[in-house]
Amino acid sequence: MKIATRNKLLQQLRTVPSIGWILLGLLVLFIIIAPHFGSADNGFNLFRQGAVLAIVASGMMVTITSGGIDLAVGSLVGLSGVIVGYSLKQGYPWEVAVIGGILACSIAGLISGLIIAKGRIFPFVVTFGMLFIARSISLGLVQGGSIHIENIPFSVINEGSFLFLPIPFWITLFVILFILLLMKRTVFGRYIFSIGSDPMGASWMGINLDLNRILVYILSGSLAGIAGVVLSSRVRTGNALLGQGLEFFAIAAVVIGGTPITGGRGSLAGAVLGALVITVLQNGLSLLGLSSEIVSATVGVTLVLGVIFAQSVYRGGLRANK
Amino acid sequence: MQISKVISLARPRFTWTRFLTAISRLLVLFIMVVVVSILNPKFLTTGNILNVLRQAAPIFIIGVGQTIVILARGIDLSMDSVASLTSVVTATLMIDNKIPFYLAMAIGLALGALLGLFNGLIITKIKLPPFVATFGTWLLFKGLTVLWIDGRVISGFSKGFTYMGIGRLFGVPMIILIAILVYIFFRILLNQTTFGRKIYSIGANPDASRVSGLKIDRILIIVFIISALMATFGSQLYIARIDSAKSDFGEGFALDAIAATLIGGTSFEGGVGTIEGTVIGALIIILLRNAMNLLGISPYWQGLATGVIIIVAVLGDTYLKKIAKRYET
């Protein structure tokens, strides 16, 4: 047990800096070559843009560590925004709308989790179905279009700042701290690691696999809901297609952050840094005036290279410890 | 359990599981047809049925590629952009460079094979998980497509090319005949050749396959080449049917192909599944869309139905397996 913990520590020390260096390198590169990248405005912008991906990636890191995957988070981000927009249009106060949006995503997560745990079906398959279902519900609610959000207090979520830093930054920080405590300081967190590395063994030890798996997907859904609130506040619309493809970027952020996709290990810092790397790349390349498709192609190449890099560090780490 | 799996690998034979899986799919398809034709008498006309089959053909052809990858325990997310890139290249070669359509299609297929080889090499040689690798190449190929065509819409293909999409032979639409040929080819490949059985074996148990001397890397690379080829071929037929091509038309192909495969009873675990299942999966997806259009339901709810059917199909399979086990032991 002691050796295992030491290995994990070494592992984290090895992988976290590697992605951190990539981030630092990108920041320096873009400050030099991209106009306005280093400005304070763009810095705040980065926080606002990165918040959504960082929140979703943190949830995805928990899911992947538990040996699962959640493909529905992108659709849930859209669903949350649509429900917020819809409820605001119906005249509900913004607090109710926000809670409603997040709650709907938690329920979607609960349903996924129930089917995964009780039906013994691959998380990939269930959440793949949920991806279709959630997107379809949000498309149906707004009939394909998007809802413009005019509520002033709601847009404060994006525009307001607290202690000179944008509110999305504080929300993200809160989420990260919450998951850090959850994974490192609670029984639930330790259960997640053991379920991910050896579900059979975990079950023999008396860990309630079903309950913990369900909780993981509720957590992942709720975080997607929070991310959806932040995103819809930024673009001031509820749109079903807002989070399209976000699930893949979140998975990529987690994997380049050094979390193996097979589960059992996870690096929260890596996932957040991975999300920042993707955000910085997207932001910097757009500032250089490249079209959005070329930006995503470059991000794709960087992801593959980043994963190769993360994996080689991971393998090197294992060899060094043997 | 393990031993029975190995024996069933030797040659496909009758099992209750396989029987119930097949029967349940046919039953669902049958019930859907009955319900829809009662609700809307226009459904059971020859024109509409041929229309359903015509729309299902490209999804089936692309789905075959995805089925083979999933059988080998992989997944190919890049099919969307492989489809877009290769068909856009095929289209520009025909329209801009005035190359005869069969030559343009051959060049498109060769490009597809190259993209598949690229996927396969990253997955086997660098050992990236297929999910991550094909997501990266999905983005990459998407960018290449835009670089190649940049927002143009290409149409006005030659008669010979569109014949494959909308022409008829002895009264049967050409595209359906092509889909049947593809079905026969892959039915034989998967069931009657050692290569086909090797795909099942890799999916069922990669470690045992490696120990028994299968060249896993080589087979996986070929599997990804086949999947890219099917994405290419399916999308070429698709642009022949709608007579236009643009950079983003392949979007959603990979998801449809995965959905058809899963609805068809191919296990995500690998090693279990059939081509027949994918035929029925593609039919169910298209039938659903067609029925909803006929019944006047907003297309935005189609995803809801697709998602529910995927989950119910897979959930149902686990229960069917339990029932089948009772008969088998």
Image (cartoon, coloured by chain):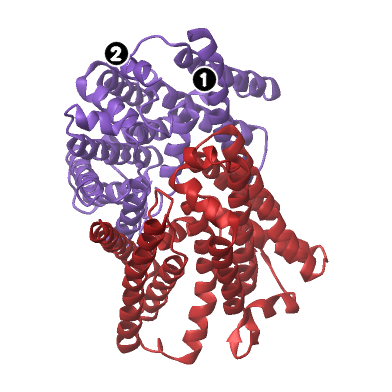
Chain colours: A red, B purple
Viewport quadrant of the C terminus of chain A: bottom left
The quadrant where residue A155 appears = bottom right
Instruction: Please say whether residue B249 is visible from this viewpoint.
Output: yes
Asked whether, in this view, residue A149 is left or right of residue B172, the answer is right
* Residue in view at x 70 percent, y 24 percent: B39
Q: Amino acid at mark 2?
A: Arg
Q: Nearer the viewer, residue B110 or A249?
A: A249
Q: Residue furthest front?
A: A2
The mark nearer the N terminus, 2 or 1, is: 2
Q: For the point 33% across and 78% down, which residue is it?
A: A26
Residue A146 seen by the camera: no
Marks 2, 1 in one chain:
yes
List the residue tagged with mark 2.
B11
Q: Residue at x 48, y 79 (%)?
A: A46
Instruction: State the residue in front, A315 or B151.
Output: A315
Chain label for disc 2:
B
Q: Chain of mark 1?
A: B
Q: Quadrant of residue A281?
A: bottom left
Side of A160 where A86 appears, left or right = right
Task: Locate residue B4, reporting x and y percent.
Answer: 37, 16
Residue contact between numbered discs 2 and 1, judged by CB atoms under 8 Å: no
What is the distance, in whole Å, between disc 2 and disc 1 at their CAs? 20 Å
Mark 2 element type? loop
Q: Position of residue B44 (x, y in %)?
A: 59, 19
Element under disc 1: helix
Q: Which mark is drawn over residue A240?
A: none
The disc placed on residue B321 is 1
Q: Position of residue B141 (x, y in %)?
A: 30, 55
User: What amino acid does circle 1 point to?
Assistant: Lys
Point out the image quarter for the N terminus of chain A: bottom left
